[in-house]
Amino acid sequence: MKITTKRALRKWVLILAVTLISIIYIYPVYLMFMNSVKPFGEIVSDAIALPTTLAWDNYTYVIKKIKYVKLFTNNVIITCTGIVGIVAFSSIAAYIMDRRKNRFTSIAHLIVITPMLIPFQTIMITLLKAMNVIHLSGSRFGLGVQYWGFGIPMATFIFFNFMKTIPKEIDESAIIDGASTFRTFISIIFPLLKSVTVTVIVLDVMWIWNDFLLPLLMVNSSNKTKTLVLAAYTFIGQMNTKWHYAMTAMVLAVVPSIIIFIFLQKYIVDGVVAGAVKG
Amino acid sequence: MSQKQKRLLKEYAENFLYIIPAILLVTVMIYIPFVMSGYYSLTEWNGISKAPKFVGFSNFQTLFSSKGEFMNSLWFTTKYTFGFTLFSNVLALALAVALTKKFKLANFFRGIFFIPYIMSMTIVGFIWQFIFTQGFSKLADITGWGFWNFSFLGDPKLAFYSVVFVGIWQQLGFYIVLYIAGLQAVPADVLEAATVDGATGWQRFSKVTLPLLGPSFTTCIFMSLTNALKVFDIILALTKGGPGGSTYSVTLQIYKDAFTNNRYGMGSAESIVYFLFVLIVTQAVLKLFSTKEVDL
């Protein structure tokens, strides 16, 4: 055989193998979607076969039972509160830390980024106690505020590293024109941070939207404040062997992320890569 | 006051004003609870009684002296971290190499592998619980292979592998895209030069590409290490630490001791040991790998 045909053959074998692996890889997700529209009897008798009738009432039942719309709103409120605070406080702090280097800002920088070394589980017990004292537990907004504290170290680190790439002459000329520090930051610097802001938002939305442990500690006691994943966790626990409802709840919990991913795939993947390389 | 002093004072006030919210927030959410954990680790406290009883280092002595649950969970976490880090990096690199070959669906497949990563880990645990029980029993019927009938979540040995497997399944896509980014950064002219010099495909990969992937290795291994050390959601949904406590990670153990057993003092002591454990492991591995990186 010629070398070129051999090489082409090898490539096709490789592509075939990758295709096969991808299909097997995503098969569990497909099974979840497919079983969520099956009646109970069909799941138990055959989890792999296609449904003979589409049981959409699984969805109407679960959506009503777990109050899906309410949960979805809770998730949006918590995530938005978290993101706005993280981006606002970290970006301006990183700006000052980079442009006004002195002893105070250097120590501040160290204080703010060091918590990246402390795993959440180390402080979760006493955090709950502390949050009870200052009344940030048991409310959606309070949970959002807590994410500020946990999100700021990494976000500041990323913003700070990026700040160095923006030439100082840009803000100096704005200040000579008479703009205040805040004004310079908002109208000149912040727009230049766009790419890195997207990175921070992608990382933090994925984290806060799907987070489990912190919401479990803080907002699990009332149905009014629960997040999507928490409610799904409790519901699936109760549904023990009622797989048709459990499957539907799983789909409802992950489908918002999947839809967003399909539309924003490029931003999400790029953001995640940038975050890992910089963080 | 001179003009200059005034300006300087204003500048300091501004610095303070813009940085203090960040400092205040991390202090309240992280430093204060951290210091409190340190204090409670020296006490016996059930979370209800008003005053925790000071007991010195006896919590730590209990943790290390007896062959108790905590040492088991520490051992489980070590094994899990090793298995997870090793296999997720090997598999991700292999798939990344395949997916950087030029073919039409490469981008689409990249997206496929990434989907579990954007899903909640809790839900991922539940999906696999369903597959290990309902799905596999059906596969056993179809294929007639005894393999599918193994008790993947019921047998302590197998449960360990199942948990590692599901953990990798959820995160593999993340490491794949990181390795792809690294592979695409390897300059094409260097690879061409190697080809001109008569290097075979394997030689090109092992002698040129791999050494230049150094930064990607460091990033991926560091990320997989920290993620594995924190494993919690997947285990809670998949096995709840069972069977017979064989899949208790340190994080789950801390959670159980504090919030189920109401042993807050002991839980705090465990969390302090866990903090030191994570710090030492990550710093040691980071040091090991960053000294091995090669520059072009």
Image: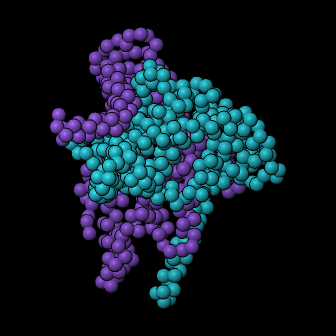
Chain colours: A cyan, B purple
Q: Residue at x 28, y 20 (%)?
A: B57
Residue furthest to the left: B2
Q: Residue at x 66, y 35 (%)?
A: A70
Q: Is residue B285 left or right of residue A194?
A: left
Image coords of residue B13 (percent x, y): 28, 35
Q: Nearer the viewer, residue A51 or B13?
A: B13
Q: Is residue B257 above or below residue A237?
A: above
Q: Nearer the viewer, residue B295 or B26?
A: B26
Quarter-wise, where is residue A241 in the image? top right
Answer yes or no: is residue B160 visible. Answer: no
Q: Is residue A188 above or below residue A140?
A: below
Answer yes or no: is residue A75 visible. Answer: yes
Image coords of residue B204 (percent x, y): 35, 75
Q: Is residue A54 left or right of residue B243?
A: right
Image coords of residue B224 (percent x, y): 41, 49
Q: Residue at x 56, y 57 (%)?
A: A264
Q: Is residue B160 left or right of residue A190?
A: right
Image coords of residue B169 (percent x, y): 52, 52
Q: Is residue B47 above or below residue A212?
A: above
Quarter-wise, where is residue A195 in the image? bottom left
Q: Is residue B41 above or below residue B151?
A: above
Q: Residue at x 62, y 34 (%)?
A: A231
